[in-house]
Structures are given as C-alpha cells and as structure tokens.
Image (tube, rainbow, N blue to C red):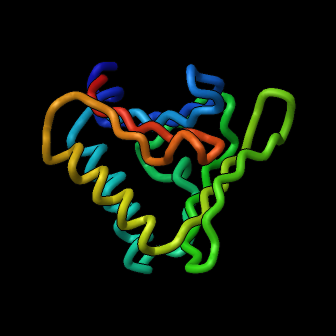
Amino acid sequence: MGQFRDEAILLDFGEGGYGSTILIDTQSLKSLTSLLEIFTRLALGSLMTVDLSSFEGVFRSRTIDSFDLIRDAGKSVLEVIATSEQRFSIRWTDSPGNWQHRADLIMALRDGQLPGHQDLTEEGDGVLVVLQFQE
C-alpha cells in the first residue's frame, strides 16, 4: 500500500483553516513531476483542457466529482460547483502566463526535494489551492 500512496496524486476539497480549500497531495518526485508536466502543457498550449482527476495515478476524495483545468487567455476563474449536498465539480480556468507561474512554483518545490507545500492561489482568490509534497 505504501508504494501506491507514494506515487499517487491525491485530490481533496473541504473547509480548512482559511476557508474553502482544494488539497493536491503528492508524496514522490515522480508524482510531483507529473503534475508539473500538466501545468507546463497548459501554459504552452499543448493541453487546453483536462480533468485532472481522470489522469492515471490521480485519486480524488468522495467530495470531488471532477477537477477541470482550462487554458483561456481572457479568463481567470476558480469555480466550485455543487453537484449534490456533499459533492463538487471544480473548474479552474486561467491564462497561459498564470499556468506558467504555477508550473514555476511546482518546479521550485520539486527542485528543493524537501517536504513542503506551495499555495497555488492566494487567500483573496475565494478558494485556496494547496499543493503538498511529502507532508
């Protein structure tokens, strides 16, 4: 079971200490690099939209139905849409430059090779997206 958890990317959504929070949990450099590649592809335009929860090795909690990442030059929105009382679809739309900025944050976490986390959004954005590595 340890190998499975180490290589997986885990997605969760709920209320945290700073309000609504999306948690992306990685435990290995392999899973962190996979996430970096997705964000980089969004920035470069080789990927325009993707349901992050559909990628191999990505597992979502029961609260998440889907987690769409969308490249759109003119729009920057993070929406959490209730699909039932306890389940949500997440749609994160952003510009190429902002996807690249987040890829840079992920790269810094990966290159540091130390346990830690990185906020991929800011507190005032309405929903906090936190990436954890080996925490």
Q: Is residue 7 left or right of residue 71?
A: left
In the image, residue 67 above or below residue 119: below
The residue under the point 23% across, 43% down is 109
Q: Quadrant of residue 14?
A: top right
The residue closer to the viewer here, 43 or 56, is: 43
> How many numbered circles are shown?
0
Q: Is residue 83 left or right of residue 48?
A: right
Provide residue 1's location: percent of width, then percent of height. Answer: 34, 19
In the image, residue 131 above or below residue 76: above
Provide residue 7's location: percent of width, then percent of height. Answer: 30, 36
The residue under the point 13% across, 41% down is 112
Q: Point out the residue furthest to the front here.
A: 124
The residue under the point 62% across, 79% down is 74
Provide residue 79's location: percent of width, then percent of height. Answer: 70, 51
The residue closer to the viewer here, 67 or 99, is: 99
> Which corner quadrant holds the C terminus?
top left
Provide residue 21's location: percent of width, then percent of height. Answer: 58, 33
The residue under the point 55% across, 66% down is 94
